[in-house]
C-alpha cells in the first residue's frame, strides 16, 4: 500500500509539472533548431557564393522581419492567446525552413527566392518566440513553481540550446553539409509546434484579460492595446536605457556571429566545426555562469555584476580572433566570455520582473525585445560590407572597441542606480494583486 501511495504521488507530481515541462521542451527544441540554423545558413551562403556581403544580406533578410513583426504583434498575442500563436508560427517556420533544401535539391533555389524564404522564417519566428516567453508565468502557476525559478529555468533552457545547437550544427555542417542542418532546423520547429499544440493542458495560453474600464464601451482595439504598452515602456527610464545599450551590443553580436566568425573560420582554415566548438564552449560556460548567478548574484550589487558580465562577454572575443592566437586561447576566451554572459539575463529578467504587469506582458515585451533587437538585422549587413572593404582584422578590432565603449560609457548614466534599489517596487505590485514577469532582451 505504501508503494502504491508513493507511486501515485510521483504521477501527481509529474502531472502538476506538465505545463512547465511541456513549455520548456518546446522552447528547447525550437531554440536548438534556431542555433543549428545560425551556423548552417551562413555557411551555406558563404560556401555557395564566397561572398561575405551576400552572407550579411541573408542575415538581414531574416532578422529585419523578425524585429518588425515581433514589435507589432504584441497586442495580437495578448488578444488571440500565446498558445495558438506559438504552434501555428512554429509550423510555418518548419515549412519555410524545409523548403530551402528542397528547392536547392531541385536546382531552382535562386538568391531572391532564398531571401524571401528566410524573410518568412524571421517574420513568423518573432511572434512564436514572444508567445513562448509570455507563457512562462502561467506555466509556473499551473506547475506550482516559483516564478523566479521558472524564469531561471527558461534562461537555462536557452543557454542549453546555445550549447547543444552550435555543437550539433557545426559537426553536421562539417560532416554532411549545411543543408542537412537546415533540414534538422525544420524538424525542430515542427516538433516544437506539436509539443505546444498537444501536450500543454487545455485552457493554457489563452488571451490576456484586460483591466476593467471605468466606462462601458467596446473592447479596446489593436492600436489602443499597442499604445498602452508604448506608454508604459516610455515611463520606465531604466528599461529604456537598458534597451538602447543592449540594442547596440546586439548589433555587434549579430555582426560577430553571422559574418565575422564564419569568415574567420574560413580564412583561418579551421572550418565550420570550430564555430560549433567555440559556441558550445561559450554556451556551457554561460550555463555555469547562470547557475552561479542564481546562487549568489542576488547578494551582490546588480550594477557591478551586470557591467562586469558585459566586460567579460563582449570585447575579448573580437580581440582574440583578430590576434591570430592559437586555438586553445580562442576556446579559453570564449569560455570566459560565456561565463560572464551567464550573469546578464538573470539580472535583466529581475529588473523587468519588478516592473511589467502581467496584462501588458505581451505588448511591453514585444516592444522592448524588438527595440533591443532592432540593430540585429543591420549587424550582418554592415559587417559583410565592412569586411569586403577593409578586411577581417580591422573590423574585428573596431567591433571590440565599440563593444567596450558602449557598455562602459552607458554605465555612467544615473538610471543604473535603480538596479541596486531594494525590491520594494515588486513587493508593492504583488501586494496590489498585479502579477508581473520579466523578459529576455539579449540575443
Image (spheres, rainbow, N blue to C red):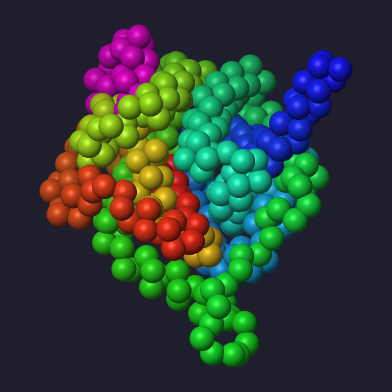
**Residue 330 located within the stretch drawn in magenta:** yes
Vertical side of 128 occupied by 234: above or below: below
For this rendering, which residue is in front, 139 or 245?
139
Q: Quadrant of residue 317?
A: top left
Q: Quadrant of the N terminus?
A: top right
Vertical side of 166 occupied by 19: above or below: below
- Residue 250, how many percent across, how many down? 36, 45
Q: Quadrant of residue 259?
A: top left
Residue at position x 46%, y 21% from top? 284
- Residue 122, how many percent across, how many down? 57, 52
Residue at position x 62%, y 82% from top? 219
Can the viewer see residue 212?
yes
Can the viewer see residue 266?
no
Q: Residue furthest bottom?
A: 216
Q: Is residue 406 left or right of residue 279?
A: left
Q: Which residues are magenta?
A: 318-341
Residue at position x 13%, y 48% from top? 412
Residue at position x 53%, y 40% from top? 146
Q: Is residue 309 left or right of residue 210?
A: left
Amino acid at each position: 500500500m505504501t508503494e502504491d501511495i508513493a507511486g501515485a504521488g510521483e504521477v501527481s507530481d509529474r502531472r502538476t509539472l506538465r505545463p512547465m515541462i511541456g513549455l520548456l521542451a518546446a522552447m528547447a527544441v525550437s531554440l536548438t533548431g534556431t542555433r543549428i540554423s545560425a551556423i548552417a545558413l551562413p555557411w551555406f551562403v558563404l560556401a555557395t557564393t564566397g561572398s561575405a556581403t551576400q552572407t550579411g544580406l541573408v542575415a538581414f533578410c531574416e532578422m529585419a522581419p523578425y524585429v518588425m513583426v515581433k514589435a507589432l504583434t504584441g497586442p495580437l498575442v495578448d488578444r488571440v492567446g500565446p498558445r495558438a500563436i506559438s504552434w501555428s508560427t512554429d509550423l510555418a517556420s518548419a515549412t519555410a525552413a524545409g523548403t530551402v533544401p528542397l528547392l536547392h535539391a531541385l536546382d531552382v533555389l535562386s538568391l531572391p527566392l532564398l531571401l524571401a524564404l528566410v524573410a518568412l522564417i524571421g517574420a513568423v519566428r518573432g511572434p512564436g518566440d514572444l508567445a513562448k516567453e509570455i507563457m512562462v508565468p502561467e506555466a509556473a502557476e499551473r506547475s506550482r513553481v516559483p516564478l523566479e525559478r521558472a524564469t531561471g529555468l527558461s534562461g537555462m533552457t536557452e543557454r542549453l540550446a546555445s550549447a547543444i545547437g552550435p555543437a550539433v550544427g557545426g559537426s553536421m555542417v562539417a560532416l554532411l553539409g549545411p543543408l542537412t542542418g537546415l533540414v534538422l532546423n525544420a524538424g525542430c520547429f515542427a516538433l516544437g509546434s506539436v509539443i505546444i499544440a498537444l501536450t500543454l493542458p487545455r485552457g493554457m495560453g489563452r488571451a490576456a484579460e484586460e483591466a476593467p474600464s471605468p466606462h462601458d464601451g467596446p473592447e479596446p482595439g489593436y492600436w489602443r492595446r499597442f499604445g498602452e504598452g508604448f506608454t508604459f515602456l516610455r515611463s520606465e527610464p531604466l528599461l529604456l536605457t537598458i534597451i538602447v545599450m543592449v540594442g547596440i551590443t546586439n548589433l555587434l553580436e549579430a555582426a560577430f556571429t553571422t559574418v565575422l566568425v564564419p569568415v574567420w573560420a574560413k580564412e583561418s582554415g579551421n572550418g565550420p566545426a570550430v564555430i560549433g566548438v567555440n559556441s558550445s564552449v561559450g554556451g556551457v560556460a554561460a550555463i555555469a555562469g547562470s547557475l552561479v548567478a542564481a546562487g549568489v548574484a542576488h547578494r551582490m550589487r546588480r550594477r557591478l555584476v551586470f557591467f562586469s558580465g558585459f566586460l567579460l562577454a563582449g570585447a575579448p572575443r573580437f580581440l582574440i580572433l583578430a590576434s591570430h592566437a592559437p586555438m586553445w586561447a580562442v576556446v579559453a576566451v570564449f569560455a570566459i566570455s560565456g561565463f560572464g554572459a551567464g550573469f546578464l539575463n538573470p539580472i535583466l529578467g529581475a529588473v523587468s520582473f519588478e516592473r511589467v504587469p502581467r496584462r501588458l506582458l505581451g505588448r511591453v515585451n514585444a516592444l522592448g525585445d524588438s527595440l533591443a533587437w532592432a540593430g540585429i538585422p543591420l549587424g550582418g549587413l554592415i559587417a559583410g560590407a565592412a569586411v569586403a572593404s577593409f578586411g577581417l582584422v580591422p573590423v574585428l578590432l573596431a567591433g571590440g572597441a565599440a563593444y567596450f565603449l558602449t557598455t562602459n560609457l552607458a554605465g555612467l548614466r544615473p538610471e543604473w542606480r535603480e538596479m541596486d534599489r531594494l525590491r520594494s517596487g515588486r513587493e508593492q505590485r504583488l501586494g496590489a494583486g498585479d502579477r508581473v514577469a520579466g523578459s529576455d532582451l539579449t540575443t
